[in-house]
Amino acid sequence: MSVQIIRPGLLATIQDLGRYGFQQYGVVVGGAMDSLSLRLANVLVGNEEGEAAIEVTMMGTSLQFNEDTLISITGGSLNPVIDGNPVPLWRPVFVQKNTVLSFTGCKAGCRAYVAVAGGFSIPNVMNSKSTYIRGEIGGFKGRALQEGDLIPLGEESSFSRKIKKVLQSKLKQGSFASVDWYVPFERYINKSVVRVLKGAEFEKFSESAQKKFFEQEFQITPQSDRMGYRLSGASLGLKQPFELLSEAVANGTIQVPSDGNPIVLLADRQTTGGYPRIGQIAAADLPVVAQMKPGDRVRFQEISLYEAEQLYMKREKEIKQIRTALLLKKWSFE
Amino acid sequence: MVRKIQTMKKNLEEIQMKPLGESALTVQFGTEISSFINKKVKALATKLHSESFSGFIECTPAFASVTVFFDPFIVKRTYGENEKSSFQIVRAILEQILETLVEEVESTPRIVDIPVCYGGDFGPDLDFVAAHNQLSADEVIHLHASAQYPVYMIGFAPGFPYLGGLSEKINAPRRPSPRTSIPAGSVGIAGSQTGVYPISTPGGWQLIGRTPMALFRPDRDQPSVLSAGDIVKFVPITKEEYDQYQERWQ
Amino acid sequence: MIKMSDFQEMVNIIDRSSVNVFTFEYDGMKMKLEKQPVFQDKVQKEEVNAAVPDQLLSNEQTDKAAKDEAVSKDEVITSPMVGTFYTRANEGEEPLVQIGDIVQKGQVVCIVEAMKLFNEVQADVDGEIVEVLVEDGDVVEYGQPLFKLKKRS
């Protein structure tokens, strides 16, 4: 079984939850920009949450399934179609042999995830299948997907096989079939307010910069990618210049170089940085940022460490609940 | 190997712990570059990678700090018997580790020669660094290549060494805005630090030269050629030698 | 961890399914449920389900009970499960249906959320929505009428 890339589109890469344990060697964590969507995509097809999936960026990507396959699409609404018919998001979908799935435009969000039952059978590099393009590490041959790539699929779980069978029998016309339930997570896409903790150097910024950071709107510039988003808007100055010793940064760290324009560090961020950090995006809102695209506007809302932790717990509980609900669905197929 | 053993208990009050979001905590041992502080960093990182706590993901050692990444959900589920946040729980665990942690000081560091072709297209900021310090380009090269640099940490990018020991005479500020792409092998200066870019990446350092040596090899068990504790020496080479090296190593 | 409300959900799902004995293990926790023999109407329904396995994936079958209760030409659409009733598929969107709308068999008329899954409830006949019997965000019971529908002749 395999997936064939008909057209790579703007950018399509294989991503999982990232490469952990190697930051001590400076190895970038990487992984899905919107890890929530990746996890749910996998759960919906009966995979482990951290299995690798295809991260489709904005538009133009076209894939062909060479066998009957159980898939799910989550994340941004990038108008996925099969034979001109829209394919529903956030649920398991059965696709027939030789079906072509195309992403035809950006309705909402920026990145969609296509998970296939069984995941992708590609080598782990430093414990991960994530593609780190700059380092030419992992994924499919260490690079973005290209026309003609044939990516082999892994072994389906018993859950996957069960849903696949039920949906296969439901297929009456066309080349795909789905269910009448879905996971309600598209609500976070198209949000423009992102919750942020004060960064380690917040107090080193001028009073007016501190105020502007939480009050004014910033725009995502075209010089934004998986490594980070460069923002434009108010220029954020320091009380007085200082050189900082390089220290670890994290997914969602907002640092400000001396030109005053903030940079949000994302999946392919460097492991350490030396620019003052004005903020840290709450983990629960990282998917919101990952679904923003150049030109979108963002406002930062201050929250406490306690609130950020509460949001984190709530999110994990929601995902657990969904996993439980799906276990019950599996059981109801028996 | 000579070992100096000393517990960190008496220094505990000098150590600061601060959150990096809800899922990470930075242990800061100091605010300057020194091998004394860096040894504590190495000791804590080594300890955590061999024997950690439930919910620990990994840690990133830096010049004077160790950042510990954890999963708040697992930390709370394992240790959270009361209203304590996962940050407070992890802080308490780390304080306990630090109390009994011993520093291990290894003697006879490994010396690694890194050939560098300075200036020209390889070092577009060499003249800026020279002008900034009122020196000639040759004087900058001479000063940069005559020192010994201890490797304090690997970070920023795969295999990127942060080196101590840069002469004060050739310090230079970071660029106002980072370059969007810097070629692999570029050698740069930022403030009082110098380093080599092992892969092509954006970055804000002033570039003075380039090495043909691959510092990052993802197919190896230890993917970084250098590791904390090594000593680096830069050896000036010509463009012809650079080309020869590159042919030989590829 | 699983909360009490999750258990209630599970019991509800099991209760209206064709399974009589159910054991469940999760995170080191075990649960076993056994059902008493069910009454006549339900047995018939189960037979239907067994014959058409794909229906287990949908919530359509529950509308059958509603059909029996319907008075004259009025139909009701009932909730297929315990959960939270939503008129909209997404916050900020238009309601899926409103009073006066003509709906077709199979059209999604509302959402019932249970255990973080959004379940689409479909009309099982063509007709006109004449009344919405519950408020957006209400917790609804299994079999509770949600809409009154005038069947189109």
Image: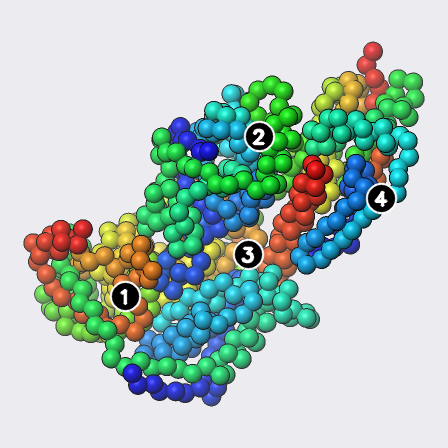
The residue type indicated by label 2 comes to Phe
**Can residue A80 be seen in this snapshot?**
yes
Could you say whether the residue bearing mark 3 is in a helix, strand or loop? loop
Residue B162: name its quadrant: bottom left
Circles 4 and 1 in contact, beta carbons < 8 Å: no
**Residue at 39% across / 87% down in the picture?**
B5
Chain under callout 4: C
Q: Residues within 10 Å of mark 1 (few under 14, many from 20)?
A: many
Query: Which quadrant: the C terminus of chain A?
Result: top right
User: What residue did someone put label 3 on?
Assistant: A282
In terms of depth relative to the viewer, which is nearer, A2 or B63?
A2
Nearer the camera: disc 3 or disc 1:
1
User: What residue did someone put label 1 on?
Assistant: B226
Relative image position of residue C80 (x, y in whole percent): 79, 34
Q: Residues within 10 Å of mark 3 (few under 14, many from 20)?
A: many
Q: Residues within 10 Å of mark 2 (few under 14, many from 20)?
A: many
User: What residue did someone put label 4 on?
Assistant: C35
Marks 3 and 4 share the same chain = no
Q: CA distance from mark 1 to mark 2?
A: 49 Å
Mark 3 or 2 closer to N-term?
2
Could you say whether the residue bearing mark 2 is in a helix, strand or loop? strand
Marks 3 and 1 share the same chain = no
Q: CA distance from mark 4 to mark 2?
A: 33 Å
User: What residue did someone put label 2 on?
Assistant: A94
The residue type indicated by label 3 comes to Ala
Q: How many marks?
A: 4
